Amino acid sequence: MSKKPTTADAHLILQLYDLRREAEMRKARNWWVTEFFPQSADEFLKIASAMGTQENDWLRQVGGYWSLAASFVLQGVLNEDLFLQPAFSGEMFLIFAKIHPFLKELREKIGDPEMFKNIEKAITHTKWGRDRLQFVLKRVETMRQKRAERKTS
């Protein structure tokens, strides 16, 4: 992997960004960001096993997109520093933070130790990424608490 981002890296980032603008992908991303706050592995698996539902499609679409994008970094195709910029990958940190508390259980229950592995590796490969994940985990927990408060009031 190149230490310094290249013009080719910038073009690939722009292409990846453009894919995120597709209409159904926008709906899927919005669902992940604003509505999907799984509280457990079982809650995640309920959506993951509901094949043919819109939520299942969105779950797989966004998870697959970020896994694919992370694979470009892991395979040395895309500059890691450019990829990890919050303006580009902030959403990846958010979706990972939402499942992080029960990721081990999720992998065990689904029988796939590689589930979300590319995303996890891309995020935790650098100290900056690990620190950023801790920051986002706290934010997601605050978001979960606020959602729970709204539901009980």
Image (cartoon, helix red, strand yellow):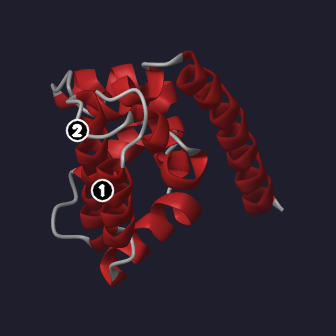
Q: Position of residue 94 (x, y in %)?
A: 54, 45
Question: Within the image, what quadrant is residue 58 found in?
Answer: bottom left
Mark 1 falls on what kind of element?
helix
The residue to which callout 2 is attached is 77
Q: Amino acid at mark 2?
A: Val
Contact (Cβ within 8 Å) of mark 2 with mark 1: yes
Q: Report the residue that reaches farthest toward the bottom.
A: 23
Label 1, residues with CA under 10 Å away: few <14, some 14-19, many ≥20: some
Residue displayed at 33% across by 79% down: 22
Residue displayed at 43% across by 33% down: 4
Label 2, residues with CA under 10 Å away: few <14, some 14-19, many ≥20: some
* Near-viewer residue (114 or 83): 83
Residue displayed at 35% across by 24% down: 121
* Near-viewer residue (150 or 73): 73
Sequence-wise, the earlier of marks 2 and 1 is 1
Mark 2 falls on what kind of element?
loop
Distance from disc 2 to disc 1, alpha carbons, whole Å, reads: 9 Å
Q: Report the residue that reaches farthest toward the right.
A: 153
Residue 37 seen in the current view: no
Q: Position of residue 134 (x, y in %)?
A: 64, 25
Residue displayed at 20% across by 30% down: 75
**Left or right relative to 41: residue 134:** right
Q: Which mark is residue 12?
A: 1
**Left or right relative to 58: residue 138:** right
Residue 117 seen in the current view: yes
Question: Within the image, what quadrant is residue 33 found in?
Answer: bottom right
* Near-viewer residue (10 or 113): 10
Q: Amino acid at mark 1?
A: Leu
Q: Which mark is residue 138?
A: none
